[in-house]
Image: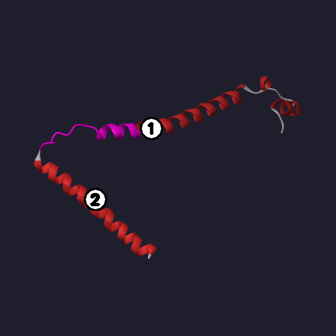
Amino acid sequence: MVSANTALKKTGTSMASRKPDEENESRRILEEVKRDSESIGSSSLARMTDLHNRKRLPEDDADDPVVILGKKIGRWLGWITVAVLAVYLIATYAL
């Protein structure tokens, strides 16, 4: 394995003799990579937190019987859909 000092001795150049433009470009690229990698992780975390917080908003019509009935119907239709889909997939691919 070649160390950085060995590589510098072979090429005959040092960090001090590098052009300022190359150093500035290297720093700029490193800053972009750092910024992009931080924004990817933090933005997905922020989106999930925002989504989680939106679900916890108080409901205005919590006592309305029509809203309660609609929620019950929607939940039952969701379970029925999952069951039908599971039966269909098992019948199609497993049997």
Drawn side of residue 66 relative to residue 85, left or right = left
Q: Nearer the viewer, residue 10 or 25?
A: 10
The amino acid type of the residue labelled 2 equals Gly
Question: Does the magenta-highlighted stretch encompass residue 58?
Answer: yes
Q: Residues within 10 Å of mark 1 (few under 14, many from 20)?
A: few
**Image position of 43 with respect to 66: above or below:** above
Q: Identify the residue position indicated by label 1 in the image.
A: 45
Q: Secondary structure at mark 2?
A: helix
The amino acid type of the residue labelled 1 equals Leu
Q: Nearer the viewer, residue 89 or 41?
A: 89
Say which residue appears at 53% left-offset and 34% top-offset.
Answer: 38
Q: CA distance from mark 2 to mark 1?
A: 28 Å
Say which residue appears at 12% left-offset and 50% top-offset.
Answer: 66
Q: Residues within 10 Å of mark 2 (few under 14, many from 20)?
A: few
Q: How is the image coloured?
A: secondary structure
Q: Secondary structure at mark 1?
A: helix
Say which residue appears at 35% left-offset and 67% top-offset.
Answer: 85
In the image, the segment drawn in magenta is: 47-63
Q: Identify the residue position indicated by label 2 in the image.
A: 78
Question: Does the magenta-highlighted stretch encompass residue 40?
Answer: no
Drawn side of residue 87 relative to residue 62, left or right = right
Q: Which mark is residue 20?
A: none
* Residue located farthest toward the top when viewing the structure as drawn: 16
Q: Earlier in the sequence, mark 2 or mark 1?
A: 1
Q: Nearer the viewer, residue 37 or 53?
A: 53
Percent from the top left, x then y, of residue 6? Answer: 86, 32
Quarter of image, res 73:
bottom left
